[in-house]
Image (cartoon, rainbow, N blue to C red):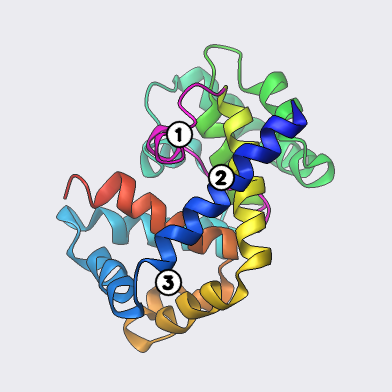
Amino acid sequence: MQDDYTHKSILIKEHIVHDFTSLNLFQLEKTFDKFKDDKNNRTLSFIAYYNRTVLDKERIRFGEFKQQWAIQGMTRKFYTFFDENFDRLKEEIRKERNIRKFYETYCCTYRREGSFCSKLFHTVLPAEFPPVDNPIKKKFNLQKEEFIDSVLIIKEGYGLFIKENPELIGGIRTILSRKKFAYLRINELSDIRILDMYYWFKENRDKVS
């Protein structure tokens, strides 16, 4: 199973390399310019929320978390549990860093909340875990994978890309260091967030804007 995970992670890494080397810096800049053109400013609203909860560590209110991350179907009973127990659960995430155990313990009570779990782990550990949803799974041909399996595969694929392609990550950081992108707070963002931000917009926003 681990060999299969590694193979799929390598394919994701190669996919990312292809995506970014097929674009020049001007094209990448234009993609990020579209953040401000997004319909109803949804992207800017989410980025402001992300900055508050991930960078500034504002306490999460899980009804708002569900709305901002566009998590469908989550019950009030489920997210109320996280509101009431967040400090304890956040400490558990930081201490154990075990998304599979956490998911099986807390995120399968009423229905399988894999996307929620990945986004919560990213919020607490933004340099270690990618937030994942179905469009991202589809992007990387992981539709048939169990959700947490896909998170771990993407996590490894992102990690391989980041380790092997510092010049590409550096090029993106250079673009996003320009004054017009100050609202992104690039110096505070993890490399995983930089990749996620690009794919999240391309797969969730750009296709429907």
What is the span of residues highlighted in magenta in the rendered image?
A: 125-145
Front in this rendered view, residue 91 or 182: 182
- Tell me, yes or no, whether the two marked residues, 3 and 1, touch with CB atoms within 8 Å: no
208 left or right of 200 in image: left
| Amino acid on which the number 2 mark rests in the picture | Leu
19 left or right of 56 in image: left
The residue that disc 2 covers is 11
Residue 117: where, in percent of width, then height? Answer: 59, 33
The residue that disc 1 covers is 141
Front in this rendered view, residue 171 or 80: 171
Q: Of label 2 and label 3, which has the lower sequence position?
A: 2
Residue 2: where, in percent of width, then height? Answer: 76, 31
Mark 2 or mark 1, which is nearer to you? 2
> Which residue of the protein is positioned furthest toward the bottom in this rendering?
179
Q: Residue at x 38, y 87 (%)?
A: 178
Tell me the tag on residue 184. 3
Front in this rendered view, residue 149 or 125: 149
